[in-house]
Amino acid sequence: MRSIMPIEKIILVLFISAQSLFSQGYLCAVGGGREDYRDWSDAPYRWMVQQADSGQTLVMHYSDGSSWLENYFKSFGARSASSLVISSRSAANDSAHYRTILQANHVFLRGGDQSRYYTLWKGTLVEKALRLLYQKGGVVGGTSAGLAVLGGVDYVALRGSAVSRDCLLNPQHPDITLSDDFLPLCPDVLFDSHFTARARLGRLLAFTAQWNQDHHADLLGIGVDEHTALCIDPEGTATVMGAGSVTLVSKNPESLVRNERGSGLFLTNWNLDLLIAGFSYDLRQRRVVGFPESAHAPSPATGQRSPEATCTFFGSLEKATLKTELESWLQSTGNDSLLLFTGAESSVTQSILHELGVEQLKPITLNSDINVSAVFERMNRLVISDWTPEQQQALLMNHPEFLTALQKTLNSPKKIFLAGTSTTLTTSLWIPNLTEHRYHLQNGRLSAVKGMESWHPALLMPNAFESDDYDENRIGGLFWLLYKQPGSLAMMVDDRSGFTLNMNRLSVNTSMPVILIDGRSVTLIDASEYRYRPSYPTRQSVALIGARLWSLVPDSAAAFDLQTGTWQQSTGVEVRTGSTLQPEGHTRLYVYPNPATNRVFIECSRPPSEPGVHMRIYNVVGRLVTRLAPAKENTWIWHPDRATISSGVYFGVLDDRDQRWVQSFLLH
């Protein structure tokens, strides 16, 4: 006979369970950047001391450093503040250090290299003491690398620091090293630091997507800007303090994810929120629970329109990649007459077109003495490229005859290719001084200029993940434009990525994904009130609550519908019906190598229902290139004749009874 647990024991078990659920401590995740008295850092660092009841602070690291932080914490009332350096695993297992940590009320982890924290402290008495300190209600904070190890899942950077460009091109990149076996203090969260300043949105998306896919999880990715902190209480309420933004990304039940080695990151309909100082967020319910009085609902966008012309946008003027994209575009658009509208008398694009054998090329600049309307009217293909911001401003402000002719061309069934910063010409707003000074966003000095508004409300940022001094201006600047013009579609286009806009449908042409942010679902907006100097304008970091994010790659069977904001079936030749892309776990096609050169293997994750099913290969405009008989029951091999088959994006299409599977790939 089974014994019945006494009621006293039941109550004790329930009490212990409740204690383990709620008796955790406080976290402060700081995004990096220099702290200083009477500056952005005062609020979060004072908060840590207050939550620790002004008790003992312990600043920890794996190497020696200055005592500045200890004195800083004392200035907020900490009873004592000292430093503890743990530089080896033997030191991390020293019982004296274990006791020192448990005597503290507050521990703060300095910046540096999170892989050192992970390899030196994981599984040691130091890690055990930090967990116990937190579980008994203590305060644990960290900046930069110290922030990186506070989540339930950590990016531990065992192979060096991953960059967004690599992670977007290959979301299974070997530099992505994630772990959940060290200091899992904030469940279901992954933190990233120096977020906007180092253009880390792409890598946070890849981190979060990879973990969710591999572990069937629902991880929340949180990127914290420099000079910004996220302070979290025991109930899971996270409050933003400091100067910049905190970015949160997560999937929702309608999201599709394709996260495969050698293929660009594909995400649909992810949640995207940006918070600034004064906003509070419930990490358990994943919703905003507090905001400053300045926050307000955005006004709805009006006058929506897009060009009638088929427009291809490419994010860079780097010669090798631009040549590849121009060659593919020229081959897909026939032999119609071509006009080059350029800001330079002698340009990179002009030399590329000559190398590609374009005959009767007509380069037109603002100085050309021509009948503008007649010249534009005669040409069926137009390339717009090599405009500096100053030249583009001059075009928009001082040359109505060119703008009229260009607007007429955009509203006709012609084919247009735009490259580099010229991609912003047709959109609603753009920023002419992105590369004027690296701290323009911080100092509130970015300027917004109205574009042609042929595509409205739309925003575009070329060279989005350039990894130079102007990352913060580019990524933060695009979000600032979304605040300036609510309800817009915003695109991040890198130097190897591009897309085509055709009849309100956006399709990607390149292996490098295009990041699309749909601002039409945003419910609340705000802007930072922080000033780096009293005489400066306010910092241009913003809050956007309720946006949706997409990371798009080539697909012949589907495209992003601008009007509905959904991933829908394409209407290209022969590839216009069948199943949409399936979530992970369904039958899939795999292409390798990708990109390929002279031989392409296409493999289905299961054999077709009947033997001998052919694979069809289409080019980027939907024309059938070839049919392949299977080499074995679920594998097809294509040996393209490179004398007749050009470089570019192609699609393998498999029809098996009433199902269709499509996979894109790139030929070099």
Image (spheres, grey):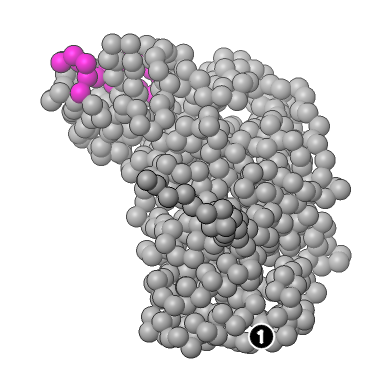
Can you tell which quarter of the image residue 648 is in?
top left
Identify the element where label 1 is drawn: strand
Q: 599 left or right of 539?
A: left
Q: 502 left or right of 476?
A: left
The range drawn in magenta is 607-626
Is residue 626 visible from the viewing direction of this image?
no
Tell me where residue 562 appears, x and y as whole percent.
60, 24
| Quadrant (top left, top right, bottom left, bottom right) of the N terminus | top left
* Residue displayed at 55% across by 42% down: 250
| Count of marks overlaid on the render | 1
- The residue wearing badge 1 is 81
Tell me where residue 334 appears, x and y as whole percent.
41, 18
Q: Assess disc 1: are there few (<14), some (14-19) or many (≥20) residues with their C-alpha within 10 Å of its C-alpha.
A: many
Any magenta on residue 610? yes
Can you tell which quarter of the image residue 320 is in?
top left
Tell me where residue 428 appears, x and y as whole percent.
71, 33
Q: Is residue 653 above or below residue 240?
A: above
Q: Nearer the viewer, residue 503 or 578?
A: 578
